[in-house]
Each structure stands twice: as structure tokens, then as C-alpha cells.
Amino acid sequence: MRTVLLVGVGAGDPEHVTVQAIKALNRADVVFVAEKRAETDELVRLRHEILERYVEGSPRTVALPDPARDRSSPAYREAVEEWRAKRAEVWEKAIAGELRDDGCGAFLVWGDPAIYDSTLAVIDQVLARGNLEFAHEVIPGISSPQALAARQRIAFNRVGGAVQITTGRRLSAGWPEGADDVVVMLDSDCAFTRFAGDEVDIYWGAYLGTEDEILRSGRVGEVAEEIRKLRSEARERKGWVMDTYLLRRSPRS
């Protein structure tokens, strides 16, 4: 039976790649690489750098054109599901066409496949379509929240506290109920600014683990505009930005 490996390769630093991930990649006959818009060619290059550094020999790589996602639709969930369905069609054809019946293929996943990533969901859709059978394995990686915590020298949680991982879209509706600290990923609208008048600290990082890494921290009201400006300038310069931050409320008296 075919085997598909979903390999977490860290937040951007090639040295984030674990020994387990290296062993998995060396099992692969084919590595599938999703190619998005031209501005993100750097991410493809970093994937190839990881393969050159850690994989013995030269595994065959197969480029997968990534379907465009409708970002203008107000129906966010429906737009994401439609995009995943299109991805599943492309990936099913590639796995069927590029892997022999007993072959092993791998997808390199930024960060960890279980955190803010669609690769697992798309693979589940491919299997649910019922046209193709294969086994699949997940190899964990260092996620951007982990990289952020390490670079900012903080822990996610405080004694007895609850941490929630959420999105900027949901944070814009207010602080998550029951959460003491909040980790937010890919917040294009800088929803943290709504807490500029509160006793809330932010630990922010962009391009974590890469040579372009940017870090800032402080009381939201004091650093929010600087972070917004840095994020905008970085996106303009590179054409894309990946950022993560932790919001921490001051202890209640």
C-alpha cells in the first residue's frame, strides 16, 4: 500500500527539523511541494534547502499547483472548504500518478501539521473521496508558537492559567472567555490593537526562525502601532508575512 508522510519541518530555521523528521524524509521516494503565488517562492526554496541538507541522495520532487482561495468572500468557512476540496482533487491525482502501489511520498509542512495547517484536513478529504487508498503518518514539528515562546523567552501559561490558540478573526470579537493568555496566528488585521487601552502585554514575532525574523514585545498600547507598521512594511517588501503573537493580561488584583 502507498504511504504518505506529513512531516513538520519547523517555523523556518532548517535546524528546527527533528531527527524523526529526517528519518521520515529519507523514507520518501517522492516529495510533494505545493507551489503558491510567486511571492512565496522563498518558502519553496527553504523546503529544497531542507531536502539538500538532510536527505541522502536526491528524492524526486513533484510540484503541486495550489488552487487560489477566494479571499473576498464574506463566507469564510465555505471559502476555505471549497479551497480544500480543490486541493484534494489535485493531491489525489498526484499521489495516484506519482507514487507506485508500495511507494512512499512526503509533504513538508511548515511548523507542525496539527497547528493552524490544512494538510491533514486535505489528506482526510482525499481518503474520504474513496478513489484512493493509502496509509498516512504524521511527524510533529516545531510550531511557530513554540518558536515564538523560545525567542521571546516566555512560557505560554502561568500557574493555574488557561491558554487558548485562536485567530485574529475570532479575537476581533473580543477576549476568549476563560482564557488567561491567548496565542494568535496570522492576524492580518492586527486585532490586538483593540486592547491598546487595557493592561495587556504582547509578544510578537514575524518570519520566526528565518534571517528576516522580527521580534517586538511590550504593553499593547505602547507597541501596537510600531508592530502594525513593521508588519505592513514587511509584507510590502516581501509580498507575504507569517506572524504569531501571545497576548497576556496582567494578573487581576
Image: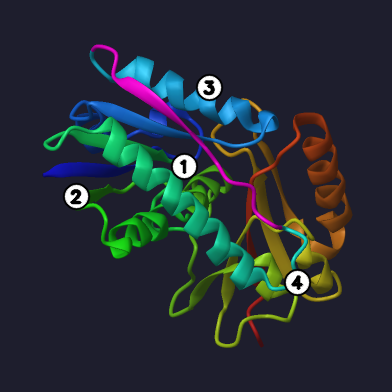
Secondary structure of residue under mark 4: loop
Category of crowding for the residue at label 2, using alpha-carbon neighbours closer than 10 angstroms: few (below 14), some (14–19), many (at least 20): some
| Residue beneath the point at 77% across and 66% down | 191
In this rendered view, identify the residue nearer to me: 176 or 249. 176
Residue 150 horizontal/vertical position (percent)? 49, 46
Q: Earlier in the sequence, mark 2 or mark 4?
A: 4
Q: Earlier in the sequence, mark 1 or mark 4?
A: 4
Q: Is residue 156 visible?
A: yes
The magenta stretch is 57-70
- Which mark is on residue 74? 4
Amino acid bearing label 3: Arg
Q: CA distance from mark 1 to mark 3?
A: 13 Å
Give the number of the mark in front: 2 or 1.
2
Amino acid bearing label 4: Pro
131 w.r.t. 177: above or below: above
163 w.r.t. 72: above or below: below
Give the number of the mark in front: 3 or 2.
2
Q: CA distance from mark 3 to mark 4?
A: 33 Å
- Which mark is on residue 110? 1
Secondary structure of residue under mark 3: helix
Q: Are marks 2 and 1 in contact (CB under 8 Å)?
A: no
- Rendering quarter of residue 208: top right
Secondary structure of residue under mark 1: loop
Category of crowding for the residue at label 3, using alpha-carbon neighbours closer than 10 angstroms: few (below 14), some (14–19), many (at least 20): few
Category of crowding for the residue at label 4, using alpha-carbon neighbours closer than 10 angstroms: few (below 14), some (14–19), many (at least 20): few
| Residue beneath the point at 38% across and 33% down | 32
- Quadrant of the image containing the C terminus: bottom right
Residue 184 horizontal/vertical position (percent)? 61, 62
List the single residue furthest toward the top.
Answer: 57
